[in-house]
């Protein structure tokens, strides 16, 4: 099964993605994670993407499309399908991916669209912390680590993403809405979008996501 998950910054997309990958054993393609790892690896792609990401802007489509194609060509276990996370994020990316996947086993089967009011997002995102070592996600209020600043799972250092600030969030939200509404419409016309209420506990959100995927 090929899944696309969509949701604004802080909608819980990262947490749901991890559960989907675990439960359905799909290959995870997160463009945000890939860019961050390319940046920390100091690669050419990382250098190109860095300035855009730090300003909360999207990396240009040509760079992003090329990168996704490259990663899809190297999937560890292609027959299990994949979870696209953070891509396609613009109508042009959706069209480019549609061209690339049409008639192949890369076509998207289901779009999970996580919906949440904007004021709830602001609180979620400014308290988000991530583990430097294993990527585990915490929140200083709703899901704190046992020891402040330290990951419960692996003891790694927790950090705040550079783009998890209110200013950056405003830019990202504005851009997210403008760019992704046409993407959702594009997939709605194909009849493959399932909307999920993301303003519930993570476990309740997960039950809804799991049900949507199991009944697909
Ligand atoms: P994310 O972790 O999905 O919030 O992505 C972090 C940042 O990476 C975004 O704010 C963008 O700058 C960049 N990025 C991730 N995915 C894409 C994409 N599909 N197209 C363009 N830029 C992206």
Image (spheres, grey):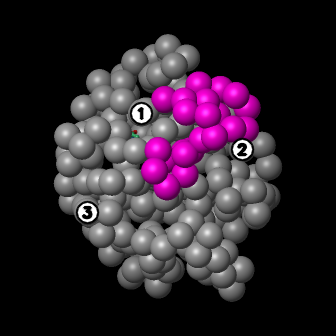
Which residue is labeled 2 in the image? 75
Establish whether ligand 1 lies closer than 8 Å to the Cβ of label 1. Answer: yes
Quadrant (top left, top right, bottom left, bottom right) of the N terminus: bottom right
Decide if residue 152 is on the left or right side of residue 9. right
Which residue is labeled 1 in the image? 161
Say few, some or many: other residues with alpha carbon within 10 Å of mark 2 (under 14 / 14 to 19 / 20 or more).
some
Say few, some or many: other residues with alpha carbon within 10 Å of mark 3 (under 14 / 14 to 19 / 20 or more).
few
Decide if residue 150 is on the left or right side of residue 65. right
Say few, some or many: other residues with alpha carbon within 10 Å of mark 1 (under 14 / 14 to 19 / 20 or more).
few
Q: Is residue 99 above or below residue 112?
A: above
- Viewer-nearest of discs 2 and 1: 1
Task: Residue 71 in the image: state x and y as whole percent.
Answer: 61, 39
Q: Which residues are magenta?
A: 137-159
Disc 3 and disc 1 in contact, CB within 8 angstroms: no
Any part of residue 68 in sight: no
Q: Residue at x 70, y 51 (%)?
A: 27
Q: Is residue 168 above or below residue 188?
A: above
Nearer the observer, 106 or 175: 175
- Viewer-nearest of discs 3 and 1: 3
Rounded to the nearest whole Å, what is the CA distance between mark 3 and mark 1? 20 Å
Nearer the observer, 25 or 182: 25
Question: Among all residues in the image, which is located at the extreme front?
Answer: 147
Whether 113 is among the magenta residues is no
Task: Residue 121 in the image: state x and y as whole percent.
Answer: 33, 58
* Mark 3 or 1, nearer chain start: 3
* Figure quadrant, ligand 1: top left
Name the image quarter holding residue 182: bottom left
Q: Residue at x 42, y 60 (%)?
A: 11
Whether 143 is among the magenta residues is yes
Which residue is labeled 3 in the image? 119
């Amino acid at each position: 099964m090929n899944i696309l998950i969509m949701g604004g910054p802080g909608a819980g997309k990262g947490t749901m993605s991890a559960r989907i990958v675990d439960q359905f054993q799909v290959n995870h393609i997160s463009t945000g994670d890939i860019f961050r790892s390319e940046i920390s690896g100091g690669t050419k792609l990382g250098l190109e993407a860095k300035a855009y990401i730090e300003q909360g802007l999207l990396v240009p489509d040509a760079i992003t499309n090329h990168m996704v194609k490259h990663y899809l060509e190297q999937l560890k276990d292609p027959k299990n399908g994949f979870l696209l996370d953070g891509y396609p994020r613009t109508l042009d990316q959706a069209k480019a991916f549609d061209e690339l996947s049409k008639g192949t086993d890369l076509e998207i089967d289901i779009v999970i669209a996580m919906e949440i009011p904007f004021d709830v997002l602001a609180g979620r995102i400014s308290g988000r912390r991530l583990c430097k070592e294993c990527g585990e996600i915490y929140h200083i209020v709703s899901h704190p680590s046992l020891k402040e600043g330290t990951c419960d799972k692996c003891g790694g250092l927790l950090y705040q993403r550079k783009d998890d600030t209110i200013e950056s969030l405003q830019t990202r939200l504005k851009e997210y809405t403008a760019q992704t509404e046409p993407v959702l419409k594009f997939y709605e016309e194909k009849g493959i979008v399932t909307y999920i209420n993301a303003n519930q506990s993570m476990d309740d959100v997960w039950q809804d996501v799991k049900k949507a995927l199991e009944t697909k």
